[in-house]
Amino acid sequence: MQTEKRLFDDLARMAQGAIGTIQGVRGELDARLREQVTRFLAGMNLVEREEFDVVKAMAAAARAENEQIKARLALLEARFGPGDPPPSSPAGPSG
């Protein structure tokens, strides 16, 4: 009976040691994999999220401005005709 208990205790200690070793190996593998992925992504010349968001906002602003200019052009063409240049203003520079 005593030897069986000692055997189970030894097996439990071995299992705990194996689990600890496996966790250590897993941690090492995670760190190495993360390092490799970071190195791979760094070599791809990707843009950062902040830079992407800035360019996206700039594109949205340009698109909105383009829509405003289209609407203004449509009004001017409706008023003066598509081929006719608008009259020059008297206060403007003469060229």
Image (cartoon, rainbow, N blue to C red):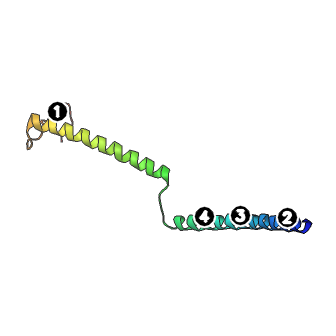
Query: Mark 3 or 1, which is nearer the eye?
Result: 3
Q: Nearer the viewer, residue 21 or 58?
A: 21
Q: Is residue 75 left or right of residue 32?
A: left
Q: The disc labelled 2 sits on which kind of residue?
A: Asp
Q: Furthest-right residue in view?
A: 2
Tell me residue 58's x, y (percent): 38, 46
Query: Mark 3 or 4, which is nearer the eye?
Result: 3
Alpha carbons under labels 1 and 2: distance apart: 100 Å
User: Which mark identifies residue 89?
Assistant: 1
User: Which mark identifies residue 13?
Assistant: none
Tell me residue 87's x, y (percent): 12, 35
Alpha carbons under labels 2 and 4: distance apart: 37 Å
Quadrant of the image occupied by residue 39: bottom right
Query: Mark 2 or 4, which is nearer the eye?
Result: 2
Give the residue at x 65% y 64%.
31
Say which label, 1 or 2, has the lower sequence index. Answer: 2
Alpha carbons under labels 3 and 4: distance apart: 16 Å
| SS under mark 4 | helix
Q: Is residue 74 left or right of residue 56?
A: left
| SS under mark 2 | helix
Question: On the rendered image, what quadrant is the C terminus found in?
Answer: top left
Tell me residue 25's x, y (percent): 70, 68
Say which label, 2 or 4, has the lower sequence index. Answer: 2
Q: Nearer the viewer, residue 9 or 61?
A: 9
Q: Which residue is mark 4?
A: 34
